[in-house]
Amino acid sequence: MEATAKAHTNIALIKYWGKRNDALILPTNNSLSVTLDGLHTTTKVTFDTELKKDQFQLNGEFIKGTAYDRVVKFLDLIRNQGNRPNLFAHIQSENAVPTAAGFASSASGFAALAGAATKALEMDIDLPALSRITRQGSGSACRSIYGGFVEWQKGEREDGTDSYAVPIAPQNHWDLRIAAVVLTAKEKDVSSRVGMKRTVDTSVFYDGWLQSIPKDLRDIKKAITEKDFEKLGEISEANCLKMHATTLGAVPPFTYWQDDTMTVMETVQYLRKKGIPAYFTIDAGPNVKVLYTPEHEEKVLEALKSVNAVEKVIVSKVGSGIDCQ
Ligand code: PMV
């Protein structure tokens, strides 16, 4: 009744931004991500008949409050599916990801928890089923089940049974680099959950965003197949800008960007002017991720580290899928 799983975060190149069902976490659009080898969570789950409630430790500290409640709610789902509704667990997570600042800590966190808990209960599930369960912890986490390039199919069914991630290209398909540029470890003002809901409900730009997705997906899949880096970067950067534009049309309007976010964006555009192909993407926080190819690493890192507000830069290669032991 004990298992450990390691999962990596993923960065969406075509963003998931909006739910059609809040309770089941069903998205309004397909999204596509790349899994990152440098940012990961390792979680050990031990079910114990002596326990009266779950215990959750993150990086050695016992966690209470909303984060604990979210973990318990997610474990309830797994316990029910595994026919052990009254069996509680010790959960020990080691997170090598800055939390709640747009670094998708929840993605690797929920994927690792799902992998370890289902394995500890000896549930007989395949990867699509694991992705489907993980989705209900945090949407973007369902893509962290696989390595390489991954698409989350939104599905059509009301019950969500056809909403899960599928692999598009494996880890070794393309040797890319993704630099996670850490500007601040401050908590977000508007969580992705709250931000996407407000955008879906009120943004005058939301329809335009949705209409643009099918073409972005078609084009980026072609770029991945053909390993066309400029195309991949252009589509990713434009898709990110469109997602963030929807937040400015929401009521009340909001943005995840800080002035330092824009300084890094300008630095990336400056690199391109100098002939170095580098592209940015940004999730629901101020930090920026930069895509580039290995031969340009030195120049890209030099430029990023020259920005005053940059606290650290975490470089990733394309990462692998979940590993459950
Ligand atoms: O899964 P959540 O609730 O952390 O939402 C993730 C939303 C974005 O990071 C902005 C986009 C994405 O597809 O990961």
Image (cartoon, grey):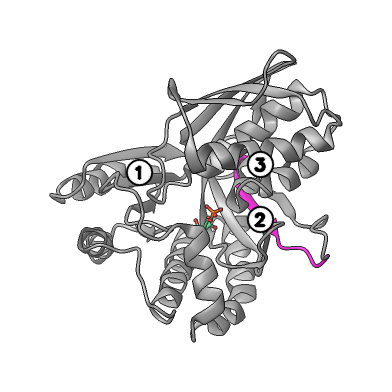
Q: Are marks 2 and 1 in contact (CB under 8 Å)?
A: no
Q: Which residue is mark 2?
A: 151
**Mark 3 falls on what kind of element?**
helix
* Nearer to me, 131 or 289: 131
> Which element is circle 2 on?
strand
Report the Cα–Cα distance between label 2 and label 3.
Answer: 26 Å
- 148 part of magenta stretch: yes
Which label sits in the foreground, 2 or 3? 3
Q: Secondary structure at mark 1?
A: helix
Q: Amino acid at mark 2?
A: Glu
Above/below status of 167 relative to 229:
above
Cα separation, mark 3 vs mark 1, equals: 45 Å
For label 3, the residue is 73
User: Counting residues from the N terminus, which is met first, the one under dot 2 or under dot 1?
Assistant: 2
Q: Which residue is mark 1?
A: 295
Split into 4 quadrants, where in the image is the C terminus? top right
* Percent coordinates x, y for residue 233 in the rendering: 44, 62
Give, as a three-letter code, the residue at label 1.
Answer: Glu
Q: Position of residue 27 (x, y in %)?
A: 66, 64
Q: Residue at x 83, y 37 (%)?
A: 81
Q: Which circle, 2 or 1, is nearer the viewer? A: 2
Q: Which residues are magenta?
A: 147-157
